[in-house]
Image: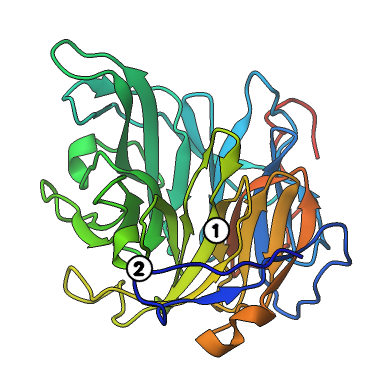
Amino acid sequence: MLRSTFSTANANAWRSAAAVLLIGAAAPATAAADSLVFVKDHNVFLAAPDGSKLTAVTTDGTADSPYRSPSQSDDGTIAASKDRLILRLRQNGEVINTIDPPELRTSASTPIDGVPVAVAISPDGTKIAYQYATYNCPIGVSCMGRSATGVTWADRPTPATAFATTYFNHPRWVGNNRLVVGGGYLSHANLVDVNAVGVAPTHWFDDQDYFSPSSDLGQTSVSRDGSRVASIHGYDGGTESNKRLVWFKSTADPRTAPLPPSNPEALCVTSVVPGLEDPVWSPSGDGLAFVIPEGIQVATSVPRDEDSCAAFSSTLVFPGASEPDWGPADVNPQPRTQPTPGGGTG
């Protein structure tokens, strides 16, 4: 059990949550008919949040050609990347269609293409956001890592100019027409109206709005109903980490409010958890899944008020797994009617 206190700009802004990481403990009980999709052993898997109904969606992923960043729409359709493609998959692994997304432009106006390192399908399944990342040294500007995020229709290749694009990273949907993306210092959480082509992302909030001294804040996730927000505060660096899981409650619905919505209200912050990544809310907004070096942790009852923060706990449900996405569809793969991508039939 990890416990700590944390100094903030406003001493009453946060309550310290116990980051109870019950490694190897029994899986949490769940009554919901929802599911987590994730990557393990370079392939896409699907399971109930308690670890039951474990299903291998793909079998042809390898270390040299892995599946990355699976996400799922409300009807259970899965989108993931492999090599330079985005694949839209049924739960049984059948490929609905593939997309080679177009190149984008970085903040240095250089083209960026290749492997989509992040993929997110909208809740209604109509659109897919994707991110490229690279390290480059364009003439006349600094050498640094650069990203770009674009959006394509889910069922067909789409020109990059059809939707809004941004230089920011880690896209996650906020409803069906907005994304939350990260941008580093002074641009930690930003909202993008994907239909507002040519309009810059709208700054939402930063780490320094809540913490003193401030640090990084990223990988922001908004619950499907817009009421809850989670982020990773801090970073892994050198011999120490100051990464913590933080969560908020919305003061305005970020799915529909005029941009920018008011800042969310601080609720809880865990103690330091090195290697912490990728928080995602359950469809109900009651649970969170997130990644630690040992695998995917699942918390099924995340405190909704600051006085309950210390009751927070989570369980390692999927050892060795990463890149989770939590959707409302039940695990219900149908028999295959086409060969698997790697050959043979399922």
Q: Residue 112 bears which disc, if any?
A: none
| Amino acid type at mark 2 | Tyr
Name the residue at 69% across, 32% down.
42
Which residue reaches farthest top? 139
Considering depth in this image, is 245 or 156 the residue closer to the camera?
Answer: 245
Considering depth in this image, is 124 or 187 the residue closer to the camera?
Answer: 187
Q: Residue 244 bears which disc, if any?
A: 1
- Find out whether the residues at labels 2 and 1 contact each other: C-beta distance under 8 Å: no
| Amino acid type at mark 1 | Arg
N-terminal label among 2 and 1: 2
Query: Relative to residue 207, is residue 115 drawn left or right?
Result: right
Can see residue 78? no
Q: Residue under label 2, please give it.
A: 210
Q: Is residue 108 above or below residue 305?
A: above
Residue 41 in the image, given as x and y percentages of width and height: 75, 34
Residue 285 in the image, given as x and y percentages of width and height: 54, 77
Name the residue at 22% across, 47% down.
163
Q: Is residue 4 above or below residue 58?
A: below
Q: How is the image coloured?
A: rainbow
Count residues near mark 2 (Cα–Cα under 10 Å), then give few for <14, some for 14-19, many for 20+: some
Q: Quadrant of the N terminus?
A: bottom right
Name the residue at 72% across, 26% down.
342
Residue 164 in the image, given as x and y percentages of width and height: 20, 47
Q: Is residue 311 above or below residue 172?
A: below
